[in-house]
Amino acid sequence: MTNLHRLSIRELSEGLQQGKFSSRELTQHYLKRIEKIDAQVKSYVTVTPELALSQADAADAAIKAGNATALAGIPLAHKDIFCTQGVRTSAGSKMLDNFISPYDATVVTKAKAAGLVTLGKVNMDEFAMGSTSESSYYGATKNPWNLDYVPGGSSGGSAAVVAADLAPFATGTDTGGSIRQPASFCGLTGLKPTYGRVSRFGIIAFASSLDQAGPMARSAEDCAYLMNVIAGHDAKDSTSVDKKVDDYVANLNATSVKGLRIGIPKQYFNVAGLAADVKARVEESLKKLEDMGAILVEVDLNMVEAYVPTYYLIAPAEASSNLSRYDGVRYGYRCENPVDLMDLYKRSRSEGFGEEVKRRILIGTYALSAGYYDAYYVKAQKVRRLIQQDFLKAFENVDVIAAPSAPTTAYKIGANLSPTEMYLGDVYTLAVNLAGLPAINAPVGLDDHNLPVGLQLIGNYWSESQLLSIVHQYQQNTDFHTQRAAIAEENA
């Protein structure tokens, strides 16, 4: 079969279980596509054909024996921030270019246990710091819709592999929008779960109180399949919450859009820099949901101006602490011929880290320093609580809150946005992480340059099933999630 990459996760599962094709055939199909196309997209940092084919053979044996899981044999790509035993895990940085992980992240362990096949590790902004995937040590990943544009970030590689049909689905991480924004830029569905829903064990840390792993795929249904694998409590992660996990696939039709109260924050639609065509596509999608029976309710979210400054104090402060472990001594990059210990520290870090990472370490170290900790970091944490309360007050009157996922569509590669411009591009996503809420991106059309636009739906705590269900029903009535990127169409 030549069009295996066009099948949904459900169709792939049924095809494998019914013997229409084997996991080895499916895996080889994707490996050939990667070899043919990825030189243009540059989404993979490391391809693992031997590992993939051995896992595929194991899945085929399990299917033949009748003891395979529903997803056994389906290929998957991991963001290169998930530690993967025996495979280079770089976090997009020169600092970890030579790091071969001795263990698996819990997400990787669960994927292996489900019989999923690891195609490889995909590109990302260095240490997940960025919104374009241009800060990677390995160079920029291209947007499959138009190779002159970025795929978003930091999970840009994860978005690009799915949009280019180089993997059926992928794992991503979201610290301030890094699943939702690249999903928006690449016309995909991407879910940022409630903080604590998916284990962070084995994820290379950026900001520990904000990082959360989630699925990226074409549809809500495809995301639900991966959520069924990766969600759940993990004793190895102290921030993982021991709470019953839904069957996300079984619940795809559990929430009725009819009577659903969708909050429309008036402040979100008056943000400076919101592109007219993005606003138009989002409003059209809300009208569609209204036609399906949803009720649109205006809500107030009064802390919008605090989102960016609060996030860019807390996240760099935590990054400063987390990245202090990269000192050239235990693992990672080490400078050549240091004259003494201080020279080792200074040169290893200055040579091993990229510009954006160094910028955030400096901001964070300053915010945590004596005399400034109370004035900046502690105050930011207090504002963070106010942002959370702002959302909870809104949820007293609505079921979900709607917003654009990003104020614009994808940027041109090399646009050289200033740090401030790049940070302001996250205005719609940051607060969700600060509050620890779940949120999902759904593709809702194209802008005037044929680049995808995304709608973001924000839910109350532990409402992943509800969000997936709403988007699934929207996708039953629209075809935006089925539209293919240019490079995928050219290589159908």
Image (tube, grey):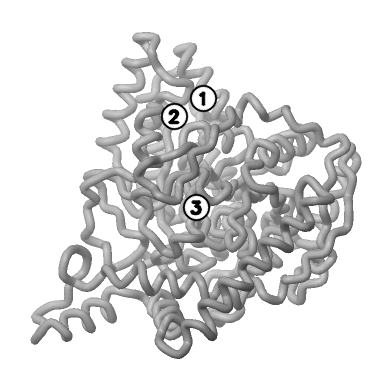
Q: Secondary structure at mark 1?
A: helix
Please tell me whether residue 88 is drawn above or below residue 469 in the rendered image.
below
SS under mark 3: strand
Vertical side of 47 occupied by 380: above or below: below
- Name the residue: 70% across, 35% down: 469
Mark 2, secondary structure of its residue: loop
The image position of residue 421, as x and y in percent, is: 61, 78
Gap between marks 2 and 1, in whole Å? 7 Å
Quarter of the figure with the C terminus: top right
Q: Which residue is mark 1?
A: 12
The crowd level at tag 2 (other Cα within 10 Å; few <14, some 14-19, many 20+) is many
Q: Amino acid at mark 1?
A: Leu
Taking the image as drawn, is residue 422 in sight? Answer: no
Q: Position of residue 461 (x, y in %)?
A: 64, 47
- Residue matched to label 3: 212
| Residue at horizontal 54 percent and vertical 75 percent from the top | 312
